[in-house]
Image (cartoon, rainbow, N blue to C red):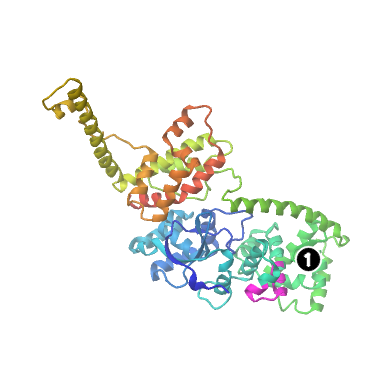
Amino acid sequence: MTNYFEWPKRKISITTLRLDYENPRLTQFGSRPNQSEIIDYLIENEKVLDLAKSIIVQSYFLNEQPIVTKENNKFVVLEGNRRVAACKILINPDLIKSDNKRNSLKKLLKDFDLSIITKLEVYISPNRSSADDMIVNRHTGGSVVERWDKTKQDRFIHNRFTDGESIESLSKKFSISKGDIKKALRRYNVFSEISKLDLEEQYKKVLREEVKFSMTNVERVYDSKFGRDFLGVNFDDEGKIKKLLPKEEFSKRLKTIVEKVIQGEINSRTLNTEKEKEEYLKNLIKSDAFDSTIELDEKYADFEQEEEKKIEEEEKKEKESLKTGRTTSSVKLISGSLHFITGIKRIDDIFDEMKDLNIKKHPNSIAVLLRSYIDMVTYQFLKNNNGIKEILVDQGVKLKQENEKTINTIADFFKTEFKIEEEIDIVKLAKALKLNGGISKDFIPSLRFMLAHLTKSDLISEPKLKSTLQSYLNKDSKVDKVIGHNEFNLLVHNEYYINDQEGLKSVWDKLEPILEYMVINIKSKR
C-alpha cells in the first residue's frame, strides 16, 4: 500500500511545472498536445478561466495540493492540471488566445498579489502509478475537486491499461471488479470511435464537453445483442471493438445512435428492457439510411485490425520517443497557439515569424531567428533588472585587474632588461600603452556570457531554472550549437555548418521555460 506521508512536499515555480498531456480531461488530441494547446483546451472546456477568477477573488486554497512526478527532468502535473493552468494564465495572461478573455482577466489582476502563486506547494510522487489511487479517489469519490465524468474515468483506466497494466492489476489497485474494468475499456473504445465521426457542429459541441454526453445511453444500445447486431460489433476480452460491417456502414449506424442519444430519443425510459431495445432497433434498421442486406462478417474485423495494428505501431513509436525525451516530427518549431509577448515589437515580431516558418523547409532561417530571439530576450531581461550594469561593473573590475597585471609585467621587464633602478611611473606607462580606459559604454556581452551571468546572479529567483540553465551551458552540445558565439558565426558564414531540425527542437524544448520566465518579467516591467 502506498504511504503518501513519505512523499516529499516542495514549493516549485509555476513556470517550471508542466501540464500533463496524458490528462484524462484532454479529449480532442490524437497525438501529444503541447503546453499551449493544453491551456487552450482547459480554458475552452474545463472552466479554467472561471477558476482563475475565483483565485483572484478568494485567493489560492492550500488544500488539495497538486501532485507531480519527475519525467525527463521536468515536473509533470499528474493531479491539479486545472489549478496549475489557472495560475499560469494569472502569471501570464498572454497565454490566453481570446482577446476578450485575456483583457477581462487583466482587469481583475490589478489588485491581485501574484507572489502568492509564483510558487505552488506540491506533493512529488515517485512515478505515475504511485499516484493513481489518490487521483482516482479525488475525482470519483468524496473530494472537493471537480469530479470526472464517466468518459474521463474510462480514459484514465484505458491510459493505464495501454501503459502496460493488466485488467487484474487495475481491478486490485482501484477495488473495481474485472468486469467493470472491461466495461470501462469497451466504453472508451466506443467513445474513441464516436470521436472520429463526421458529426454536425451542434453534436460535436456536446461531444467535446463530454459531461453533457451520456456514454451510458450509448452503452445501453451495444450491451444488448440487438444493439451489437445493429452496430455490427463485438468485443474481445480486452474491450477492443471487432467491426463486422464495412467502415462506412458502421459509421453511419453509430452516428445515428449518437445523434439520437444527444437528441434525448435514446435514454433509460425509452430503452430499458431487452424487448424495448429489440423493437426500437428493428424499426430503426428499416430506415432507407442503412443497407440491411449486408451480412455481419469477420472479414471486416480482420481488415480493421490490420489498420489498427499500423496505428498501434505508430502510437508505440510515439510513446518510445516521449520516454527518451524526443518528440515526433512536426512542421513547426513553436506551436501557433503559444503566445510569448514582451511588448517590444521587434522581439515579438521575430517570435511570430519563427512560429510561421516550416522547420523542415526553413531550418537555417529558424536557427538564425531563434539565436537572435534568445539573444534579444536575454539582453532585455538583464537590462530591465540592472543585469547589464552588473556585467559592466564586473567586466570593468576584471579589465582593470588585467591592465594592472600587464603594466606591472611590462614595468618589471623594462627594469630588468635595461637595468633601470628608479621606479617607473605606472600611470604614464598605462597612458602610453592606452591601458587606462574602462569598459566601453557600447559594450554588448555575448549571449553565452549573458546566460552564464544569469546562473551566477540572483536575477532568476527559481533555483531549479538556474541549475538547469547551468547544466545546459556546461554539457549540452545542441544548446551550445545555437547560443555559442563562434557557432553562430559558423552558422552565418560557413556553408558547411549545419543546424538540423531535431537539434533546434531540442534547444527550444530545453530553453522554453527559461525564456517564458524572462518574457513574463519583461512584460511586467513595461
Q: Residue furthest top?
A: 418
Q: Which residue is mark 1?
A: 236
Does 364 sit left or right of 286 as displayed?
left
Q: Amino acid under label 1?
A: Asp
**341 and 434: which one is in front?**
434
Visible residue check, residue 516 = no
Q: How many marks?
A: 1
For the record, the magenta segment spans 171-185
Report if residue 181 lies within the magenta region.
yes
Residue drawn at the location 37% of the way across and 65% of the way down: 116
Quadrant in which residue 255 is drawn? bottom right
Between 174 and 184, the one lying in front of the other is 174
Question: Which quadrant is home to the N terminus?
Answer: bottom right
Main SS of residues in magenta: helix
**What x and y, as percent, mark residue 481?**
48, 37
- How crowded pointer 1 is (Cα within 10 Å; few <14, some 14-19, many 20+) is rated as few
Residue 521 relative to residue 98: left or right: left
Q: Name the one closer to the observer, 466 or 110.
A: 466
Magenta stretch holds residue 184: yes
Left or right position of 442 against 315: left
Task: Give how far across and how far down residue 31 sits, in percent.
Answer: 62, 53
Q: Secondary structure at mark 1?
A: loop
